[in-house]
Image (cartoon, helix red, strand yellow):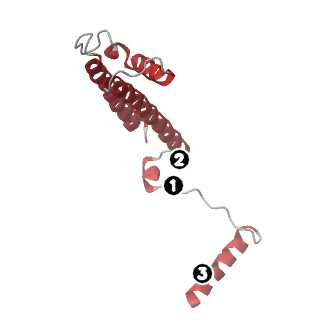
């Protein structure tokens, strides 16, 4: 019990010495890695946020491509449905020339639309995931 009373007594004397009885301000916590590299805490936080946003965007693009490929591969999806139309149109735009349904990286023929979608949009989804992860690693402090 004496150790507890000694600590509280020393805290009271410190606060009285620091500014007429007011509590002193605490310093922001900085990790040893940040101190060793001399990095600014604010800049690291911004870089980490940008890296996270880029990774999330890449994952969302890959999910859109995967969902569209699955819809095409599972069978005749109702292409007049607004959601299906938006997914397939967006997947075509995201995949660019690699995912063109009339001739992408792989072209199995016009009757093999499911194979074309799975192969070309799948490659585009993997590309977004790889590039997103690389950007995340490069930008993150």
Which quadrant of the figure contains the C terminus? top left
Residue occupying the point 56% across, 86% down? 3
In the picture provided, is 60 more to the left or to the right than 27?
left
Mark before the other along the chain sequence, 2 or 3: 3
The residue nearer to you, when weighing 17 against 11, is 11
Residue at the right extreme of this rendering: 20
Residue linked to disc 3: 7
Q: Residue at x 69, y 72 (%)?
A: 15
- Report the residue at 44% width, 32% height from top: 60
Q: CA distance from mark 2 to mark 3?
A: 31 Å
Circle number at residue 41: 2
SS category of the residue bearing label 1: loop
Above-or-below relation of 62 to 11: above
Above or below for 99 versus 12: above
Residues packed near mark 3 inside 10 Å, few (<14), some (14 to 19) or many (20 plus): few
Which circle marks residue 138 in the picture? none
Q: Earlier in the sequence, mark 3 or mark 1?
A: 3
Q: Quadrant of residue 58?
A: top left
Instruction: Characterize the local packing of mark 2: few (<14), some (14-19) or many (20 or more) Cα atoms within 10 angstroms.
Output: some
Find residue 13 and report its horizontal and vertical position in percent: 68, 77
* Residue that appears at 33% across and 16% down: 99
State if disc 1 and disc 3 touch (CB < 8 Å).
no
User: Badge 1 local density, few (<14 within 10 Å), some, or many (20+)?
Assistant: few
**Residue most extreme to the bottom:** 2
Image coordinates of residue 36 in percent, x first then y, are 43, 51
First in sequence: mark 1 vs mark 2: 1
Instruction: Give the distance between the C-alpha atoms of the residues marked 1 and 2, in whole angstroms.
Output: 7 Å
- Frontmost residue, 129 versus 39: 129
Q: Is residue 97 above or below residue 77?
A: above
Name the residue tied to disc 1: 30
Task: Label 3, secondary structure: give it.
Answer: helix
Q: Position of residue 35 (x, y in %)?
A: 47, 52
């Amino acid at each position: 019990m004496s150790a507890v009373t000694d600590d509280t007594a020393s805290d009271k004397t410190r606060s009285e010495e620091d500014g007429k009885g007011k509590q002193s301000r605490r310093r922001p916590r900085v990790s040893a890695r940040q101190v060793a590299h001399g990095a600014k805490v604010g800049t690291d936080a911004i870089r980490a946020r940008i890296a996270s946003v880029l990774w999330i965007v890449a994952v969302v693009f890959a999910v859109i491509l995967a969902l569209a490929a699955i819809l095409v591969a599972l069978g005749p999806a109702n292409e007049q449905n607004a959601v299906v139309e938006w997914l397939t149109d967006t997947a075509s735009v995201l995949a660019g020339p690699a995912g063109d349904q009339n001739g992408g990286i792989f072209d199995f023929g016009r009757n093999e639309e499911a194979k074309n979608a799975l192969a070309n949009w799948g490659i585009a989804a993997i590309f977004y995931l790889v590039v997103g992860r690389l950007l995340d690693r490069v930008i993150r402090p």
